Amino acid sequence: MLRSTSLHRTLVAILAVVALAACGGTTRGSDAAEGDGGGGNERSANPDAEIQEGLKIAFLPKEIDNPYMTIMDEGGTTAVAETGGEGKAVGPSDASASSQVSYINTLIQQQQDAIVIAANDPNAVAPALKDAMSQDIAVVTVDSDAAKDARHVFVNQASAEEIALTQVELITKQIGGSGKIAILSATPNATNQNAWIAIMEEELKKPEYADIELVATVYGDDDDQKSFQEAQALLRSHPDLKGIVSPTTVGIAAAARYLSSSPYKGKVALTGLGTPNQMRQFVKNGTVTEFALWDPAELGYLAGYAAAALASGQISGAEGETFEAGKLGERTIGADGEVILGPPTVFDAENIDDYDF
């Protein structure tokens, strides 16, 4: 009888160890079982876990042919390669949320370990992203956020305040502190653009900006030709416009191209967010004096490491968690799962040749 009881206890102990080993790893599927029962949206974290090799991580930009997005996703796939994983960029040729949804569904079917997405619309992509999360796919948003319950981590360029206030400061200086200005944005539902615009609008209500009037906000849908036409239409509707702020790399380049060959060159200030390689010719020919941006390759690189850490179970997206991001060093997750790259850089004729992206 004692031998039977002892053998039973031994078998129970062995089975417990086997079960613990099966549940304690960082393979796909483990985190979903440890969530709140709501489809696996919550993930557990083990800071001592190693980054898994062979992770499949897909990057889904707003638009596959957007030069800024291309640079960002190249940075992301570089990071994934450094972790021993397989990264790829796929996406629509138009900046529409519905197109992104179909790609998300395909990536779910492919059983990617993580999806990194720059959302065109925060809510339109949410159901598909939640479906991905319910199937234990780590979801990271980068550059433009989705609904907070539809991703684990948001990798942001800089704080919304830093980006918005930098653009207000630049346009104020360039128009001499007074005059009419307009905003040429991307899509009407772009999360990041709308957050920056809202802050800019509030800032411009302050007494020190009493002589500046924001007369219009228009949208080029992150399409080069439409952005060009919107810039042209702004000057037709407001021939006394003093400045344009375009917080989108596609928009600022298109507006610069229009101004550079128009009678408004040197008379209408243009600033916003652009890459040095896009804007170099317009800075050197006097169309643009200053603009700002962060390094999109580093933004994608940070997102790639965040995705690998999530998929490996190192982090869950909770505030205060840390992870190593290669050459960018240790990063800490802030409130609402946000990780910030850093403040924007201002580019002008003196420093633009120091950058190549």
Image: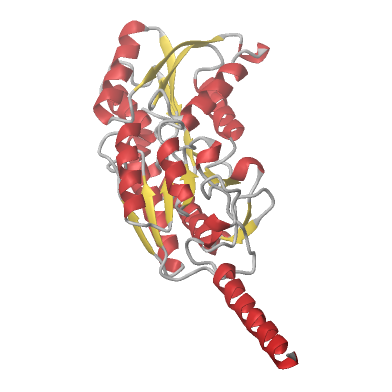
Residue at image coords 35%, 33%: 97
Q: What sort of colour scheme is used for the picture?
A: secondary structure
Residue 60 vertical placement versus 188 (above, below) = below
Residue 178 vertical placement versus 139 (above, below) = above
Residue at image coords 72%, 88%: 6
Position of residue 270 measured from the top left corner of the image (x, y, whole percent): 42, 24
Residue at image coords 54%, 17%: 176
Return the residue nearer the eye: 168 or 57.
57
Quarter where residue 231 is shown: top left
Q: Quadrant of the N terminus?
A: bottom right
Position of residue 225 measured from the top left corner of the image (x, y, whole percent): 24, 26
Position of residue 138 measured from the top left corner of the image (x, y, whole percent): 48, 53
Can residue 103 be seen in this snapshot? Answer: yes
Can residue 356 be seen in this snapshot? Answer: no
- 2 vs 326, left or right, is right
Position of residue 354 measured from the top left corner of the image (x, y, whole percent): 44, 50
Residue 4 vertical placement versus 195 (above, below) = below
Residue at image coords 44%, 14%: 242
Return the residue nearer the eye: 90 or 241.
90
- 299 vs 283, left or right, is right
Q: Residue furthest bottom?
A: 3
- 162 vs 78, left or right, is right
- Count of numbered labels shown in the rendering: 0
Return the residue nearer the eye: 299 or 148.
148
Q: Residue furthest front?
A: 1
Residue 14 vertical placement versus 100 (above, below) = below
